Amino acid sequence: MEPTNQRPHPKLSILKIPSLTHFFADVEDYAEHVRCVMGAVPETWIRCSEVVYRAGEEGGVWQRPRTRYERRAAEMGHNIYEFEYRLSKNS
């Protein structure tokens, strides 16, 4: 079958949803690295949220179930750093 030069279906452009990505860390140096790397390209990645869950604090506002990794890090006394970035519409 010969390739055609047809344009994509018009509804496909409507379905473009900005991409979200999450980062989690229990080491402060890694969290700072995420801030530096993602902050180096603010025209590409927009920070939506940054939350620090303090070790030893129970309860809190968890938007989802805690993972085994997070529970283990909290048991070791580590803070949990959660980042959410959205891909810019300009990229």
Image (tube, grey):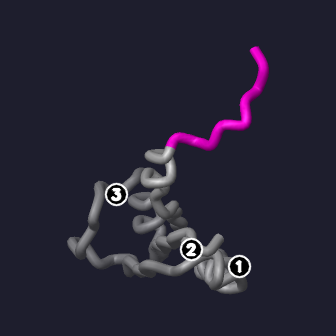
- Nearest the viewer among 3 and 72 is 3
Residue at 50% from the left image edge and 53% from the top image edge: 13
Please tell me which of labels 3 and 2 falls first in the chain.
Answer: 3
Q: Residues within 10 Å of mark 3 (few under 14, many from 20)?
A: few
Position of 69 relative to 51 (above/below): above
Residue 24, x across and y down, in percent? 52, 66
Q: Which residues are magenta?
A: 1-9
The verdict on residue 66 being magenta is: no
Residue at 46% from the left image edge and 58% from the top image edge: 17
Please identify, in this view, whether the residue under mark 2 or under mark 1 is nearer the observer. Answer: 2
| Amino acid of disc 3 | Arg
Please tell me which of labels 1 and 3 falls first in the chain.
Answer: 1
Residue 73, x across and y down, in percent? 47, 64
Q: In this view of the protein, can residue 27 be seen by the observer?
A: no
Helix, strand or loop for disc 3: loop
Gap between marks 3 and 2 measured at Cα = 28 Å
Residue 49, x across and y down, in percent? 42, 79
| Amino acid of disc 1 | Val
The verdict on residue 2 being magenta is: yes
To which residue does mark 2 refer?
Answer: 88
Residue 68, x across and y down, in percent? 42, 51
| Amino acid of disc 2 | Ser
To which residue does mark 3 refer?
Answer: 66
Gap between marks 2 and 1 measured at Cα = 15 Å
- Which quarter shows the C terminus? bottom right
Residue lying farthest to the top in this orientation: 1
Helix, strand or loop for disc 1: helix
